[in-house]
């Protein structure tokens, strides 16, 4: 603990008569999950957090001698009777502590028992990704409930280039094709640049002009529209795009973009929006609706600056929702190292794609997708795709919440100790 933190804690204790409560305290048993939880909390919650090695039993012993945090994350591992351990924990927690549980079991019955009977705010099973922690744990820590729009229908993923030509469209196309062929998720890729979009060209298909029709008359969206306008890139991945003349005025209006994305969410598991690098009228609307914003940057100082600005804008629109940074073309002559780029950005990048001059440009020129070939690009695309799609089944299997008396946040006052 730093001197300034210790001083503020002491002052808070003098003012209130009790030590200051941590905003979030986590007890995690395995190093991988501990590192992941620590990284997310430090990035999203920032201050007033602490991550310790241990499990629910460790938490119970230590919380007997210290104030309860406002949010508590505990690891129950593969315990046969986690409910018994959580019952013991409830006796040392203050009633308003929000308890979040991590375990090893993918068990819907256990989920319902802990969340609907015991009053645990959320249960996640390992392995945890950054996405599930941000989406399911962080809203309970920062007092920002998950929006209803984020729990029904498909997920929206916005790909944004920090600057034009940075490779955002290439990565978006690769992720979409992988999702449709690998995890077999019904995926649609929408190119929101009706004039200069290159997705159809890179995919080696002819655009059907569906995007313009959707943006000009969103009230006419129906299944027939999809049949006529969406171009199949694979068995479970479609492309929605237009290639309009530069002198033809086509404006992407915010309300039209919102209606289109809402419509697509009802027909696809994953909706990938390729957003132009230059902000337009609907730019902020798409970021606001996105469950995940992925900024693709080149290893340059100007790209780091613009990435920082986009992440900040997405943070304002999405709250604690997921924002990822892909550093593309690492190793390109005359550019920054990863360390220098991250120093300029002020945060670590989430994914790195090396400079692949013999793979990406040739594929884009010939209309052959690099994701269909064995290459480092495919491996990284698979990692990004799994981060996007990993939690969808959990949402579909979750039961609606119901109000019940629980062991956490009981409706009666506990007797004082001693």
Image: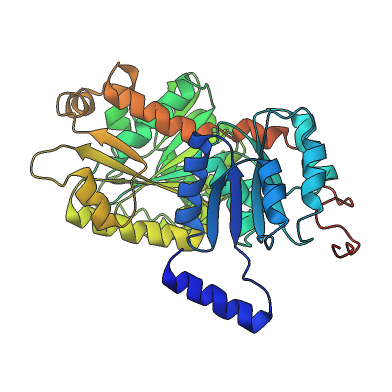
Q: Nearer the viewer, residue 54 or 267?
A: 54
Please state the horizontal and vertical placement of residue 356, each as a whole percent of the image.
19, 29
Residue 15 position by quadrant: bottom right
Residue 293 appears in view = yes
Q: Nearer the viewer, residue 181 or 143?
A: 143
Q: Left or right: where does residue 3 sit relative to residue 412?
A: left
Q: How many marks?
A: 0
49 w.r.t. 185: above or below: below
Residue 320 appears in view = no
Please state the horizontal and vertical placement of residue 235, each as a whole percent of the image.
49, 18
Q: Quick one: which residue is furthest to the top in this view?
A: 374
Q: Left or right: where does residue 94 sit relative to residue 265?
A: right
Which quadrant: the C terminus?
bottom right
Please state the horizontal and vertical placement of residue 240, each as a whole percent of the image.
43, 36
237 w.r.t. 245: above or below: above
Please state the horizontal and vertical placement of residue 224, each as a whole percent of the image.
57, 32
302 w.r.t. 197: above or below: below
Q: Left or right: where does residue 205 sit relative to residue 363?
A: right
Q: Nearer the viewer, residue 192 or 130?
A: 130
């Amino acid at each position: 603990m730093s001197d300034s933190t210790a001083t503020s804690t002491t002052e808070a204790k003098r003012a209130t008569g009790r030590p200051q409560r941590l905003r979030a305290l986590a007890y995690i048993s395995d190093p991988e999950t501990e590192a992941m939880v620590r990284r997310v909390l430090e990035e999203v919650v920032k201050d007033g957090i602490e991550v310790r090695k241990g499990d629910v039993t460790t938490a119970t012993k230590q919380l007997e001698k210290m104030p309860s945090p406002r949010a508590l994350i505990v690891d129950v591992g593969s315990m046969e009777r986690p409910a018994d351990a959580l019952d013991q924990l409830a006796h040392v927690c203050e009633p308003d502590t929000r308890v979040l549980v991590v375990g090893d079991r993918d068990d819907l019955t256990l989920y319902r028992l802990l969340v609907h009977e015991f009053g645990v705010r959320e249960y996640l099973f390992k392995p945890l990704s950054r996405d599930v922690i941000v989406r399911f744990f962080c809203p309970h820590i920062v007092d920002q409930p998950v929006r209803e729009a984020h729990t029904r229908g498909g997920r929206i993923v916005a790909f944004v280039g920090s600057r034009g030509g940075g490779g955002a469209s290439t990565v978006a196309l690769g992720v979409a094709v992988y999702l449709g062929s690998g995890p077999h998720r019904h995926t649609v890729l929408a190119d929101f640049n009706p004039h200069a979009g290159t997705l159809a060209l890179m995919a080696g298909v002819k655009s059907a002009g569906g995007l313009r029709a959707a943006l000009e008359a969103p009230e006419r969206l129906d299944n027939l529209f999809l049949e006529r306008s969406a171009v199949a890139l694979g068995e479970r991945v479609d492309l929605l795009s237009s290639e309009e003349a530069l002198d033809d005025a086509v404006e992407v209006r915010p309300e039209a973009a919102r209606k289109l994305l809402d419509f697509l969410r009802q027909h696809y598991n994953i909706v990938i929006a390729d957003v132009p690098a230059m902000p337009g009228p609907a730019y902020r609307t798409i970021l606001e609706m996105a469950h995940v914003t992925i900024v693709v940057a080149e290893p340059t100082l100007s790209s780091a600056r613009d990435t920082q600005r986009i992440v900040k804008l997405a943070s304002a629109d999405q709250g604690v929702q997921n924002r990822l940074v892909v550093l593309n073309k690492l190793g390109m002559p005359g550019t920054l190292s990863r360390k220098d780029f991250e120093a300029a950005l002020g945060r670590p990048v989430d994914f790195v794609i090396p400079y692949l001059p013999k793979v990406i440009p040739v594929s884009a020129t010939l209309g052959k997708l690099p994701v269909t070939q064995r290459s480092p690009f495919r491996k990284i695309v698979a990692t990004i795709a799994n981060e996007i799609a990993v939690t969808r089944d959990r949402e579909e299997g979750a039961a609606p919440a119901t109000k019940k008396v629980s062991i956490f946040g009981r409706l009666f006052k506990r007797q004082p100790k001693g």
